[in-house]
Amino acid sequence: MSQPESMRRVVVSRERIEVVRAEVPTPLAGQVQVRSVAVGICGSDTHAAHGRHPFIPMPYHPGHEVIGVVSALGEGVTSVAVGDRVTVEPDLPCWGCKMCTSGRQNLCENLQFFGCGWEQGGMADYFTLPANRLHAIPDGMDDRTAALIEPLSTPVHAVRIAGDVAGRAVVILGAGTIGLLVLAVVRAHGARRVVVTDVLEAKRDRARQLGADDVVDAAASDAADQVRSALGESADVVFDCVAVEPTVRQAIMMASKGGTVVIVGVPASDVSVPLAIVQDHQVRIQGSATYLPEDYAESIALLASGAVPVEQIVTRIRPVEEVAAAFEDSVSGEQIKVLIGMDPAFG
């Protein structure tokens, strides 16, 4: 099938979020061209659109939570075939630095990121990427479920590096998309008791419906005490999916003594912490950055097993022509995961 000479591409600037016409990219040697089917809107996308992401310059081409169909192959590519359904692992490592050569390419010293400041993103009819950045979507997995592979991989990675949560007391700060996906992962890993906090009652109710043992209003002056009471003890692991100063401080108090705080959310600015408590109470603060291939493999397995309630997580789908409204949906507090349909048949 012949390809069009131009395509739709979303561009985000400080003034607007718009769909423009652009040239269809041609894959170079080792690259694959993909026809985009659907793209999720991430918190990093909305943070960047409001000028609050520390690492994404404006304007940019969004879309890293993307699924699509291989439409053309560059020279030398044999790992995928035209027609394959794929999802993207969007980090673009250099493969030569200390981190890359030690299997930690998510921490590449020269890292670039597809859809986050790179020259291309998935909110376009076509895009090109190195073939090794693609993962096959299982034949039995529908597109709506597959669209959660990338966002679920972030919580999978965070839970993995936190250490074994089986039988442990866990707290999740923030009941947005990532927080609720962390909830699904820790439940799948056998956490003994899980408490979720959020400032919005609707989000707390949603967390309870999706498996939280208890919920707490994050805005309460004694939120940390309420969480410890709900757990019946201090937290073994706290996942901070908000990453603002009040939640970081709450997390440290919940994890005291001897607990672990995992920073999953992307901070918009620096915070101060009660360092004396961190030191004296031996609290571990662990950053969590994106994912690795093994996290994608577990994400796919969890989704295939039905461990994630996809119909309750994906709450809004809009066509690309309504992308600005979709960004607004994503920050409204009324939706969980908002998807953009690049293919008119998606939805």
Image: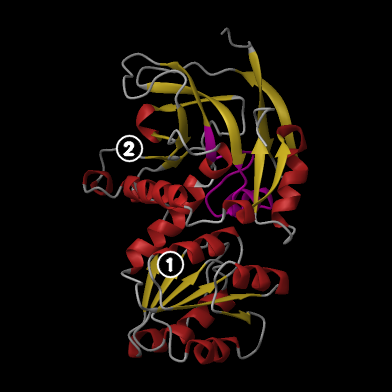
Mark 1 Cα-neighbour bin, 10 Å: few <14, some 14–19, many ≥20: many
Residue 18: image x %, image y %? 74, 34
Mark 1 residue element: helix
Give the Cα separation between the discs numbered 1 and 2. Answer: 32 Å
Q: Return the mark for residue 4.
A: none
In the rendered structure, the answer to whether residue 113 lies left or right of residue 326 reads left
Q: Kindly report the secondary structure that dominates the magenta region of the rendered protein.
A: loop
Q: Amino acid at mark 1?
A: Val
Mark 2 residue element: loop
Q: Is residue 244 above or below residue 141?
A: below
Q: Return the mark for residue 94.
A: 2
In the rendered structure, which segment of residues is drawn in magenta?
Answer: 40-67
Tell me the residue at 39%/49% (across/down). 301
Which residue is label 1 attached to? Answer: 186
Instruction: State the quadrant of the C terminus.
Output: top right
Residue 188: image x %, image y %? 42, 63
